[in-house]
Amino acid sequence: MADLAGKTILLTGASKGIGAAIATTLGDRGAHVIAHYGSDRAGAEAALEACPEARKRFLQADMGVPGAADELFAQALAWRGSIDVVVANAAIMKSAAIDGPDDIWDEVWDETLRVNVLSPARLMRAAVRHFLERGGGSIVALSSWVVHRGSSLPDGMAYAASKAGVSAMAKTIARAYAKDGILAYGVAPGVVRTRMSEEAAESLGGEAAVAAGLAMGEWVPPQDIAEVVAFLCEGRAKHLSGATVDVNGASYVR
């Protein structure tokens, strides 16, 4: 069980699904958690309900707005004066059909890239600058198995492409700043039981049809992802930096 006592961790997208499970686990393991949310503060508060008031801070930011990530990091840093780990989790998944209207295609791609790539990139950039000053730190970037296998949903190309961008940035940071004590990891979930995945499953025949195609015949519980993230946040797996940890129940092995 990861021991995160004394660590200050900034987590984006802490209100729902994987993010909420991560927030709860980080709090339970003793971390000071800065929980970012877009609009659902109640969800973030519920995730950290058991965490003492002195060890939690809630910050709102619309990751689709230019500059929001920079402001978020500045506010997070002001809380305790230092950040040990940044967990880049917040993301959206919207559909745009190849044979659909051009304006819908452009709108979905523009918004997806702003929220899923440009804002995390600014956040990770700010983290690297801070870590260089303090002598090290860690980044955990939530990717997806669609980066490596492609999406089952052709309408989800924007999401798949955006997750590839975040994954590539984390790997680049790991290589470029390894000697500076900066660690960067990727976590690539498979089909996780979240509202986002449940909605996507409707176009694939429903939850049962999706589960039938998985090696274990079941969706990944969000807690499984949270456990992996908590372990990486410890920073003890130094030589795992640059790696992507697949959490998909053996449904995609590479």
Image (cartoon, rainbow, N blue to C red):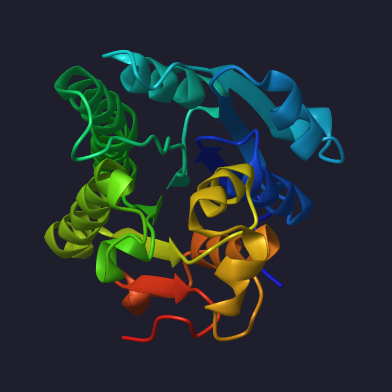
- Identify which residue, 205 or 225, lies in the foreground: 205
**Residue drawn at 81 percent across, 39 percent down:** 51
Report if residue 3 is visible in the image.
no
Assign the C terminus to one quadrant of the image.
bottom left
Indicate whether 245 appears above or below 46: below
| Residue at (54% x, 35% y) in the render | 13
In percent of width and height, residue 211 lies at 61, 72
Q: Is residue 48 left or right of residue 135?
A: right
Q: Is residue 143 above or below residue 35?
A: below
Measured as percent of width and height from the top left, residue 224 is found at: 64, 68
Query: What residue is drawn where x is 63% and y is 38%?
Result: 33
Any part of residue 80 in sight? yes
Q: Could you say which quadrant of the image residue 244 lies in? A: bottom left
Q: Is residue 38 left or right of residue 98?
A: right
- Residue 26 at what x, y percent from top left? 67, 51
Q: Residue at x 28, y 32 (%)?
A: 126
Position of residue 28 in the picture relative to residue 34 (left or right): right
Q: Nearer the viewer, residue 19 or 207?
A: 207
In this rendered view, identify the residue nearer to me: 77 or 216.
216
